[in-house]
């Protein structure tokens, strides 16, 4: 028995991720207003490198849920901005490891503050309990679909 409790018009909004898009747009605006000249997509790559520097491009694909051509383009552009550098892997010279530059490390605190500000704006009037329920539901949805495609 289906568990779809959405009306047809609601389902489209749910699938397209209106909230996610609105948050990304606001974060991009907050970056621009603060003079941070990177895109949200570039920031997502930097975010994962801040968590663990020296990831391979494949690891960045997996972490950001992007395909190889997208990551290659993002890393190319981050290199042009002098925020990352590619280094051939010591174990496999066909593989590049991506490392942060000092400039990228300097951006971390400012952009994380802007991300927190954006989330605070987005969650205005939302209780901690509501956030927890939303996280549980979205994790279940993800797990359901990840187990099918695995």
Image: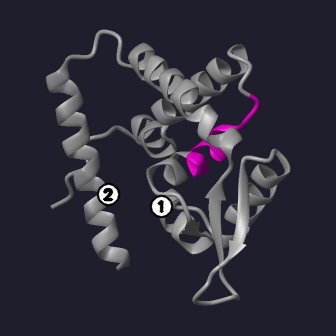
Q: Which residue is mark 2?
A: 142
Task: Tell me the residue at 19%/25% (across/down).
Answer: 130
Distance CA(mark 1)–CA(mark 2): 14 Å
Q: Determine crowd level at label 1: few under 14, some 14-19, many 20+ residues with C-alpha closer than 10 A.
A: some
Residue found 70% across the figure and 88% down from its top: 94
User: Secondary structure beneath disc 1?
Assistant: helix
Give the quadrant of the N terminus. Answer: bottom left
Front in this rendered view, residue 24 or 79: 79
When asked about the image quadrant of residue 74, the answer is: bottom right
Mark 1 or mark 2, earlier in chain: 1
Residue 73 image offset from top left, x and y in percent = 77, 60
**Residue placed most toward the observer, 28 or 82:** 82
Q: Main secondary structure of the magenta part?
A: helix
The residue that label 1 is drawn on is: 63
Image coords of residue 44 (percent x, y): 57, 46
Decide: is 128 above or below 102.
above
Q: Residues within 10 Å of mark 2 (few under 14, many from 20)?
A: few
Q: Which residues are magenta?
A: 37-46
Give the image location of residue 56, x and y in percent: 58, 72
Q: Which residue: 62% across, 18% down?
A: 30
Which of the two residues, 40 or 95, is positioned nearer the viewer here? 95
Q: On the picture, is 57 further left or further right than 117?
A: right
Residue 39 drawn in magenta: yes
Q: Is residue 50 above or below residue 96?
A: above
Examine the structure image and report whether residue 44 is included in the region drawn in magenta.
yes
Nearer to me, 148 or 58: 58
Query: Which mark is on residue 17?
Result: none
């Amino acid at each position: 028995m289906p568990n779809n409790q959405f009306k047809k018009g609601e389902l489209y909004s749910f699938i397209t991720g209106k909230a996610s898009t609105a948050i990304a747009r606001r974060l991009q605006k907050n970056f621009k207003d603060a003079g941070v000249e990177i895109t949200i997509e570039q920031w997502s790559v930097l975010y994962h490198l801040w968590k663990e520097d020296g990831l391979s491009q494949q690891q960045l694909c997996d972490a950001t849920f992007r395909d190889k051509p997208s990551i290659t383009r993002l890393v190319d552009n981050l290199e042009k901005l002098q925020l990352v550098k590619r280094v051939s892997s010591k174990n496999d010279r066909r593989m590049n490891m991506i490392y942060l530059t000092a400039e990228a490390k300097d951006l971390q605190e400012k952009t994380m503050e802007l991300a927190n500000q954006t989330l605070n704006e987005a969650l205005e009037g939302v209780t901690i309990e509501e956030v927890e329920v939303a996280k549980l539901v979205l994790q279940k949805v993800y797990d359901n679909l990840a187990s099918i495609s695995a």
